[in-house]
Amino acid sequence: MKILLTGGAGYIGSHVLLAILKKKYDVIVIDDLSTGNINLLPKNTNLIQCNINDHEKISQILQNRNFDLVMHFAGFIKVEESVQNPKKYFQNNTDNAIKFFETCNKFNLNNIIFSSTAAAYGNPTNNNSITEDEYLKPLNPYGESKMKTEKYLLNNKDKFNSIILRYFNVAGADPQLRSGLISDKATHLIKILSEVAVGKREKISIYGKDYKTKDGTAIRDYIHVSDLADIHLKAASYLLENKKSNIFNCGYGKGYSVLDVINTANKLFDNIIKFDYEKRRPGDAEKLVSNVSKLSRTIKWKPKFNDLNLIIQTAVEWEKKIYEKSL
Ligand SMILES: NC(=O)c1ccc[n+]([C@@H]2O[C@H](COP(=O)([O-])OP(=O)(O)OC[C@H]3O[C@@H](n4cnc5c(N)ncnc54)[C@H](O)[C@@H]3O)[C@@H](O)[C@H]2O)c1
């Protein structure tokens, strides 16, 4: 299999790259390193540093290379930033993505795996567990920018076969600690908790304690990043065999409140995680839990790391490693 991977120097892309290299598939990474980190790439990675909106450079890359498919991770991901600066998100996550897909199409590269998000659902009507046919009503420009790109792919089924993967909350790090999340201003709960655990930060702020949930804090479905990487390989085989577009939720189908996560970490790490409460953030949903039966049934995926303790432990181990190395 020959894969073109955008955003490979980022958190999720770098884990997928490890899984691809383990399979010994051919892969070229495109990344402009705007939020990515070169230290996340294994030595000898075939990296081309460029923006996905650079039509000429992308055309040169595609010329005579015959990729089987694209895995498109490149994008911006901070909900709060998207509320403050929506244009930045529509430009990169929608316009640049579409321009890139059009360039791919010119070179007959039409099989696409697209990183989308549960943020596209907004506050779902059936919030027990969300299926892929739930109505999309994003609460923030980030979710909207991804939804628009999804729509583009779905409206152009004559040009593209796409697998849209709607990730729920991705967390944890490679169990061998070859990759993990590097970001100075990360907004992910388990990242922030890890920074507190290693002494980089004093405490966690919990945004909102008045949601209609068991303890008032928001509920999310956390999936280990290495399980998510495995989903991409299975989705790639499915796409190449079936040449048919599809949409899958990626999660474990189990919800944890913010307090559940902090309490789990405090059991693991001797109550060192201090926290306080702040008011709700604009754009945050109350509860997002996936229904993953379609994914399990269709691509025959079984999780290997479905354990909140393990997710937190790998995230904290990784945080220790990058703290010591000042990455
Ligand atoms: N992390 C999550 O919990 C989560 C949840 C849902 C969806 N996603 C989606 O998954 C994808 C990857 O997320 P991540 O957490 O790895 O983010 P990340 O910021 O770590 O990685 C994104 C990578 O894309 C690169 N990039 C961004 N814009 C680019 C451009 N125009 N041209 C070339 N490279 C560019 C960045 O340098 C970075 O290496 C994103 O599209 C995101 O929306 C992530």
Image (cartoon, rainbow, N blue to C red):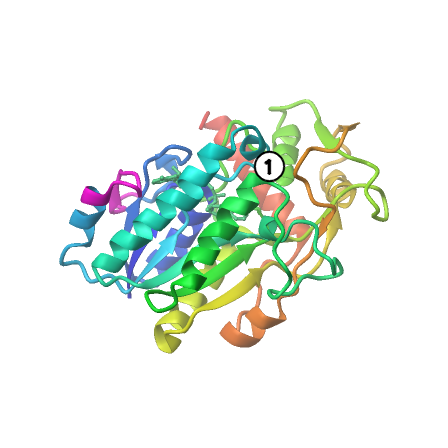
- Amino acid type of disc 1? Lys
* Quadrant where the image shows the N terminus: bottom left
Give the number of callouts: 1
Near-viewer residue (199 or 99): 99
Q: Residue at x 75, y 38 (%)?
A: 266
Quadrant in the rendering for residue 255: bottom right
Question: What percent of the width, then of the height, locates residue 80?
Answer: 59, 32
Q: Residue at x 59, y 37 (%)?
A: 191
Can residue 9 be seen here?
A: yes
Question: What percent of the width, then of the height, locates residue 243?
Answer: 36, 74
Label 1 crowd (10 A; few <14 / some 14-19 / many >=20) = many
* Quadrant where the image shows the C terminus: top left
Quadrant in the rendering for residue 272: top right
In the drawing, does residue 12 fall left or right of residue 20?
A: right
- Residue 286 sits inside the magenta stretch: no
In this view, 320 is above or below 166 = above
Label 1 SS: helix
In this view, 157 is above or below 86 = below
Question: What percent of the width, then of the height, locates residue 114?
Answer: 43, 56
Would you say the magenta stretch is mainly helix, strand or loop?
loop
Can residue 8 be seen here?
A: no
Quadrant where ligand 1 appears = top left
Q: Bounds of the magenta span?
A: 43-56
Quadrant in the rendering for residue 10: top left
Tell me the residue that label 1 is attached to. Answer: 191
In the drawing, does residue 226 fall left or right of residue 3?
A: right
In the drawing, does residue 74 fall left or right of residue 292?
A: left
